[in-house]
Amino acid sequence: MENAFAANQPRPDALQEGVLMADAGNGVSGSDSSRNASDPAQRSAETAAAQQAQAAADKAAADAAAVDPVQAAPVDLSLSPATISQLSAMPVDTVPNLASFPTPGGVPTAATYADIAQKPAVPASIETNVWSSSFSITPNDPAAVAKAALSDVSVNIGLNYVGDLNANIEARMGIAPAQVTFAGAVSYTNGVTSYGLSGVAGPFGGVADPNYGLTADFAKQLDFGKLEASLNLNVSPDGFTNGRVAAGFTAPLSDNWDGYARVGVGFDRNGVTSIDSAIGADYNTGGASLGVSGRVDTRTRDVSGGAKFNLGIKF
């Protein structure tokens, strides 16, 4: 029985070995826990080291691709004493003459470049609106307006055009009775010959029948005088009413006197109604004139005429 009990008791060497093994096991377990705590710090350090290495590599690649700037070589602009001496001795023409050079197209051959530079071309102005308005009252004398009857007063509104052709359009509005008359004219002159065309229509309103009139005139300056002619025609709503054709000639008689002769013929739908003529002279400086005129009515055979003398004195 002692042997059996002894067999069941642990051996002292076995207990010591178990303690040693337990201590060894505890030591291994403590080492693994310390390693697990240090892994995140190690990985963070490795990541930072990798990023620094990548940044260094990128900078090295960028530096390798960059083009080194080229420093420009300095330019020597200084003049040598010999060159300065030669320039000082050269003659200088302060008034150059370029007339010997051919002129460009469109420039008169008599002009030089210097002339063109001194007289620059003035750009032409383009007018886009040369119509101007007008306003007047007939009669236009304040004293006459105060004495005139309402039937003699009209208010005139129009447009005027000044250019190669002169033109005007006007509306003349009466007060008593209330009516309106339209008038217009166009004229042209080239300094020697002039042409004119004018017309009138009205009055419209009131009891008067409207009249439509057209007048054409012509004037030409000759070497020995001035020739003038005109034609007037009037038409009513019933048809042609009357007309007149006239011609005249004016010539200088002396330094201050001009002589004239005029003739006119009136007619209607039945034929010639009258013949009138005038002959006289005008004194240009003092405003004096002397003339003789006559008129013959072809229907009644009546003859009329007379002589007149006008003298104007200016202070």
Image (cartoon, helix red, strand yellow):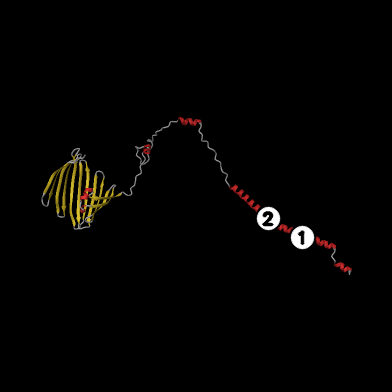
Q: Is residue 171 above or below residue 249?
A: below
**Residue drawn at point x = 85 percent, y = 62 percent:** 12
Residue highlighted by disc 2:
41
How crowded is the residue under tag 2: few (<14 C-alpha within 10 Å), some, or many (20+)?
A: few
Residue 10 location (% of width, % of height): 84, 65
- Disc 1 marks a residue whose amino acid type is Asn
Q: Is residue 195 left or right of residue 53?
A: left
Residue highlighted by disc 1:
26
- Disc 2 marks a residue whose amino acid type is Ala
How crowded is the residue under tag 1: few (<14 C-alpha within 10 Å), some, or many (20+)?
A: few
Residue 28: name its quadrant: bottom right
Residue 40 location (% of width, % of height): 68, 56
Mark sitting earlier along the chain (1/2) = 1
Toward the viewer: 193 or 309?
A: 309
Toward the viewer: 212 or 165?
A: 212
Q: Is residue 213 above or below residue 312?
A: below
